[in-house]
Image (cartoon, rainbow, N blue to C red):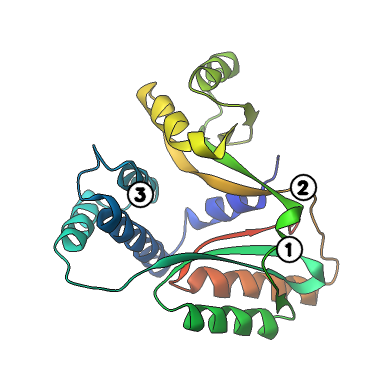
Amino acid sequence: MSGHSKWNNIKRKKGASDAARAKVFTKVAREISVAVKEGGPDPQSNGKLRDCIAKAKACNMPNDNIDRCIKKAAGSEDKNSYEEITYEGYGPSGVAVIVETLTDNRNRTAGDLRHYFDKCGGNLGQNGCVSFLFTQTGLVIVDNPDNDLDEEKVMEDCFDVGAQDVNFEDDCVEVLCDTTAVREVREGLEAKGYTISSAEAAFIPATYTAIEDPEQADKMSKLLDLLEDNDDVQNVWHNWEE
């Protein structure tokens, strides 16, 4: 679990440019819109919307922006129907990649992703071609920038709210749980005063793939950049040992 690639990517984005933050806000706004249309604009009765709001706040999305997204979705006449589609493929040097999308046009999204993989020396595959290399689990990231949290107390609190395992990293605590318990664990830890940076169902690789060739490594970085820049892409998981 240590060195989990997705979390490394999240940490790199903490200091991202305004343009990159705008991309993140666009993706979160789309998730909020879907949550509102599915369960209504009240986060007290709409658990999925509560999750989206928590994610938005973890991304430093201003409260005014969040409120506008909810109001816009609640009063929107937009009939666009978004669907969640997961794509799988291999990047350069056989790196396994899983891409979670939220799209209103699956043909456009599939075409874009296939182009990215081809351009960077990889290939988009069929469902199941790489997912067997990952385990899906709930992952809640607790902020610990100064590494001053008491480990014994943190572990006690985490297991008290339903965690299955706890890992201490340099500036955070990784809390693993069942995929169905992510909301319960996040809300439980927030109630205990912890700051949550991320909470989601994560694809954790069983093994990692190293890229020895610098040119292939550059192509893999380019592939990840292209995927993250696409508005339809919500999450990218991979087993590249960077």
The residue identified by callout 3 is 52
The residue identified by callout 2 is 206
The residue identified by callout 1 is 96
Image marks 3 and 2: residues in contact by CB distance under 8 Å: no
Circle nearer the N terminus (1, 2): 1
State the SS at label 2. loop
Image marks 3 and 1: residues in contact by CB distance under 8 Å: no
Give coordinates of residue 108: x percent, y percent. 48, 83
Residue 153 shown left or right of residue 37 in the figure:
right
Alpha-carbon span between mark 1 and mark 2: 11 Å
Residue 176 shown left or right of residue 217 in the figure:
left
Alpha-carbon span between mark 3 and mark 1: 27 Å
Residue occupying the point 35% across, 49% down: 52
The amino acid type of the residue labelled 3 equals Cys
Neighbour tally class for label 1: few under 14, some 14-19, many 20 plus, Cα within 10 Å: many
State the SS at label 3. helix
The amino acid type of the residue labelled 2 equals Ala
